[in-house]
Image (cartoon, rainbow, N blue to C red):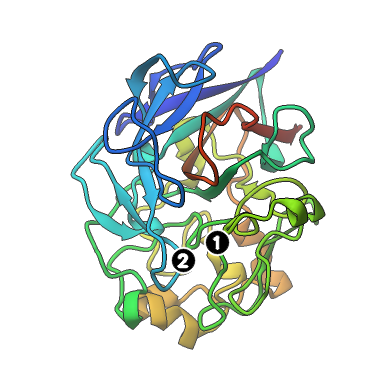
Amino acid sequence: MAEIKFQVLGQTNGNASVDTFSGSGLAFYGTSAGSSVQIGAFQDNTYVANADGSNYTSAAGNVKYVANTFPSGVCTTDGFGGASFTTGLSGVCSYQATMGIQFGHTTAVKTQNVQLRIYDRSNINHPASGVNTKVAEIINHNGSASTSQGVLGNPSTVVGSGDFFWWGEPWPTEMVTKGFYTNSSGEVFYNGLSSASRTNGDSRLATAGVAGSYASVGGTGVVVPLANSPGSGQKQLNKSSVSGSSGQIWPKWTQYVTNTAQANTAFIPAAANFGDGSAVSNLAKTYGGTGLDTHHTWAVALSASPLSIGSKEQYGLYVSLEYL
């Protein structure tokens, strides 16, 4: 029997502090729990809550998108599970992510073609209504207090193996070769570059008429890929160091930050030794884990901004995967 749980992580051993939302969901709040987020701003607090956010319980990890900062990928954590700091996504610990997604099965299996969608709770191919959402997969067991990942060309001291940029925010052409990621099943996931007029090409957003509606995950325009077979607590993805090409996996971002000059814009030179992820011989190293396990856990950062006044209830998260 297979099941998917949505969890609050928050523990350094990889276990969940809230095993399942169990009929609830996540609510994004302003400067205090229960308060509204201003239009165009991003949340300062994230909690497990009911459908309209009027009743909240456990705090979740808050990873806040920092707007208008080069490059996409800078964020602020609220200190959930550790000290509060501003850093790049690769500096956020996995257990500090907004939520965990756990797939469980009665027998050990591998997982692949894992896809995360933001939708309107009616049709998974339709974008959510009235919300701008940024999403990133977090794979980093150590974390970093660095504030300089890629900012004005300064290096970061830690390189996580998850997403380096937010999905739903334009990726900077100064640092990327291509605006897409290919998974092991051959599925291609696109994200707009800073040179493009739209980040999300879903035609349903054309009638939104609201600033920021195109720069969001959702619909068919931006679907987020997650790593293969992470194992329970992401143990299949754990590397003692990600500063070289040895080890079980290479970072996902190796597929689009594919040359030394681009990598050195963001990272210390020793962290740029992963080669070119577009090469066939190297591509498989960016897919994630390969081991069998009865449970697989993904850590995901979510950041949301309202495009209009009022609670956003046509707003959901959907995960699909294959297991074998």
**Residue 169 has which mark?**
1
Q: 284 or 226, which lies in front?
A: 226
Image-quadrant location for residue 244: bottom left
Question: Residue 141: x, y in percent?
Answer: 35, 46
**Residue 204 has which mark?**
none
Image-quadrant location for residue 181: bottom right
Q: 170 or 113, which lies in front?
A: 170
**Residue 72 has which mark?**
2
Q: Secondary structure at mark 1?
A: loop
Is 15 located above or below residue 253 in the figure? above
Q: Are circles 1 and 2 on residues that touch, CB within 8 Å?
A: yes
Residue that lies at the very extreme toward the bottom in this rendered image: 261
Q: Is residue 185 left or right of residue 132?
A: right
Question: Residue 23: x, y in percent?
Answer: 56, 12
Q: 49 or 100, which lies in front?
A: 49
Report the residue at 46% width, 66% height from top: 72
Report the residue at 29% width, 34% height from top: 12
Disc 1 versus disc 2: distance between alpha carbons?
7 Å
Image-quadrant location for residue 112: top right
The quadrant of the image that shows the N terminus is top right
Question: Residue 221: x, y in percent?
Answer: 74, 54
Which amino acid is tagged 2?
A: Ser
Few, some or many residues within 10 Å of mark 2 (<14, 14–19, 20+): many
Of the image marks 1 and 2, the number of the one nearer the N terminus: 2
Question: Residue 269: x, y in percent?
Answer: 36, 81
Which amino acid is tagged 1?
A: Glu
